[in-house]
Image (cartoon, rainbow, N blue to C red):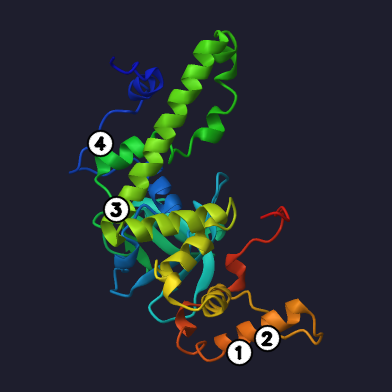
Amino acid sequence: MAPAPNLYAAWRAQRPGAEPLREDGPPPERLLQAVWQHQRLLRDQLTLADGRRVRVLHPGFHNREPGPDFRDAIVQFGAETPQRGDVEIDLAAGGWHAHRHDVNPSFRAVVLHVVWDGAGAGGLPTLALKSRLDAPLGELGEWFGGEGSTRAGELAGRCCGPLHELPREQLDAILQQAALVRLQLKAAQLAARARQCGWEQSLWEGLFAALGYKHNDWPMRRLAELAGASADKLPVELWQARLFGWSGLLPAELPRGRGADAEYLRRLWDAWWRERERFGEVILPRVAWRMGGLRPAN
């Protein structure tokens, strides 16, 4: 018996803007913003126009108000100290001057100009993404229509009326179909990352990112990249010491008490101080973490 057609998937394929993207042309700027937000990139191969390597410790928070596209990103150029600032997305490097960002005070905190193609403008660090995507444009376009879409907030509540009139059985079927589509999109994203680093590492990073929840998914993903999928080869407390050390969250001063927590922290520091110099370049700054609004259970 053939499976029932996925009406939700068919509806998505007919939505405005769902036409396949051409590989030889630039993508819509909305897609480029989503690619940056979700880091659908070959993250180990990012280099500036001047040749320096780029590490994205946090892509920033999408800004829907006037000003740069992303606020409070954390990036590292070469072996320099990670810096916090804004990121502006343009299709062309010339957009920096064409849009008069160079004379707009709202853009003074921009530390990185991300473009589709082209050399840098005005001395600002510039990163071109054209040859650094983790999947073909057509695949990214399909992903953008679902999991990666930045328009979800704009459409919130608009499906309530039509769905409210459906019989319960049809509504349940559509929700199940939508869940399947979302699962397939997530699987495609994991598969794209697996093409770079293997399935085990891709799943490891996905697990860490999920445990970071909404605000700390990117620092957690970075820890997974540093740890690799070989944690089982280390003693448990050495692995924990590295995770806390890389995260930058080990307290600078040890507690004076003799309780179980104090003893545990001393053991972590005893392991970490031997390795701190070795990993100095990859330690995350504390500003990469957002501690406000977290549930205790998280």
- Image position of 116 (left or right of 277): left
Mark 3 near mark 1, Cβ–Cβ under 8 Å? no
**Apparent side of residue 181 relative to residue 26 in the rendered image (left or right):** right
Label 1, label 2: how far apart the Cα atoms are: 6 Å
**Residue 64, how many percent across, how many down?**
55, 44
Residue drawn at (60%, 24%) of the image: 157
Amino acid type of the residue that numbered disc 4 sits on in the rendered structure: Leu
Query: Which residue is at a point 56% across and 87% down the rendered structure image?
Result: 271
Q: Calculate the distance from the C-alpha at mark 3 to the C-alpha at mark 4.
A: 15 Å
Residue 34, x across and y down, in percent = 42, 46
Q: Are marks 1 and 2 in contact (CB under 8 Å)?
A: yes
Can you say which quadrant of the picture contains the N terminus? top left
**Disc assigned to residue 175:** none
Callout 3–callout 4 Cβ contact below 8 Å: no
Would you call the spot at circle 3 few (<14 residues within 10 Å), some (14-19), or many (20 or more)? many
Provide the residue designation for mark 3: 134
Could you say whether the residue bearing mark 1 is in a helix, strand or loop? helix
Contact between labelled residues 3 and 2, with CB atoms less than 8 Å apart = no
User: Which dot marks residue 270?
Assistant: 1
